[in-house]
Image (spheres, rainbow, N blue to C red):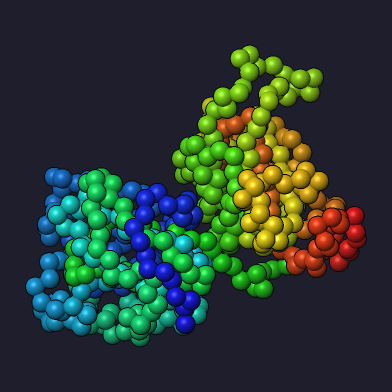
Amino acid sequence: MADLPREGKLARSPDFTQLIDMASESVGGKILFATDDFFAPAENLIKSDSPRRGDDEYTEFGKWADGWETRRRRAPAALSNGRPSASAGHDWCVIKLGVQGTIRGFDVDISYFPGDYAPRISIQAANLEEGKEPEIPQRGVRMGVAATPEELEAVAELRSSDWDLLVPMTELKPEKPASSHNYFPVNSQQKWTHVRLNMFPDGGIARLRVYGVGHKDWTAADPKEPLDLVAMAYGGACVGFSNAHFGHPNKMIGVGPPRSAADGWETARRPDRPPVLELNGDGELLIPGCEWAVFRLAHPGVITQIEVDTTYFKGNSPASCSLDGCILTTQEEEDMIRQKWDLPGHRWKALLPVTQLSPHRSHVLDSLTLELQDVVTHARLTICPDGGVSRLRLKGFPSSICLLRPRDKPMMRFSVKAGFRSNL
């Protein structure tokens, strides 16, 4: 049974929108079932791009819509091939998440549905064992249809009406026609694999964003293959940063290659930069400050390879970067967040020295821990003086921590490959 979430409340610009959209088609999200796809199919819900307006566009079934739009119900059950179907008297769909994990919040976007939006929704979720879901007929490209009796019979095996309720029935609030976001925070630590979106009774929804943090089964990982220890799809997350004026650092640890300059971390220009730029004897910029972002790794481990990608940042990439790591307990992380990451310098261990960066290029670099084999739980990327980074990948090997001595004592180093351990 799920730990009961608090009732979802509408919010504006919540922090959870900086997390990964676990339902997006771009990460493998999939519509398994929908009661009705008359005016526009449910697949539009999980498009990665924003909805667009289509004032003068029509299909054979009516006005074109960039979202999921069902027919106007005139009976408790919709018709399927001329026969009534048992669809609960309202419309709903089931989505298989592309990234499975903890859900932090939803965005039910009804942009461009001013006269057709669904007046109320609720959202349920389930954690289904891999391979245990019933075989539901492939949907294909569809419009102008309701679910078939065969589809309804197959989806009934999911018993989705009994799934845990994450967002109770709530009225949707249309705002600006081009930007009508309804945000619902979720307070649950459980892992979820599927969600069911209910609309009451019918209508249109442009997009459903399911924001959260991924979970990975580390016991099934190949110990000989390095993994991206900071990937958001595995559970990595940004837990602090100095500046994120144009883009949040979480975008750097997203799924797949960057799509544009908007898909990365970008800071404002530092106002303390000197009027005239100069170089020191090593060819480095003489500048007073830098920007940084701290990440909690998805799993403690040894980082052996670092990728810093500035793709799409052609005139605004940083001049250089460095990377440090440390080991923190949950309580220490919470303390650092409150203290804005004023962590004593000796707690950080250098993983990458100051390294020059080039615009619009992926930089693959070896970590300093190739020989030392430091296990870390957190990593700090520092860029100098400011600018944008599209992707950060920290490849390495997950490892358990065996564990720390008191805070005033040095940490232990582990050699994952050789099984060597020594105290510093």
Give 404 or 29, whichever is nearer the viewer. 404
* Number of numbered tags placed on the structure image: 0
On the picture, is 289 further left or further right than 258? right
**Above or below, comparing residue 86 to residue 317 in the picture:** below
The spot of residue 63 in percent (x, y) is 14, 54
Is residue 285 toward the left or the right of residue 67 in the image? right
Residue at the extreme top of the image, as rendered: 276
Extreme residue in the left direction: 74
Q: Nearer the viewer, residue 257 or 19?
A: 19
Would residue 11 be found to the left or right of residue 274 on screen? left
Residue positioned 86% across, 66% down in the render: 419
In the figure, residue 195 lies in which quadrant?
bottom left
**Which quadrant of the structure image shows residue 363?**
top right
Instruction: Give the residue displayed 46% in from the left and 67% down from the top.
Output: 187
Using the rendered image of the protein, determine whether residue 84 is visible from the camera's viewpoint: yes
Q: Nearer the viewer, residue 158 or 12?
A: 12
Q: Quadrant of the C terminus?
A: bottom right
- Write the residue at 69% across / 57% down: 332
Residue at left offset 24%, top offset 63%: 171
**Is any part of residue 143 visible from this angle?**
no
Residue 202 placement (x, y as % from top left): 18, 67
Q: Name the spot of residue 40 as percent of width and height, x first.
A: 22, 60
Q: Is residue 352 left or right of residue 269?
A: right
- Point out residue 12 in the picture as x, y percentages from the top left corner: 37, 50
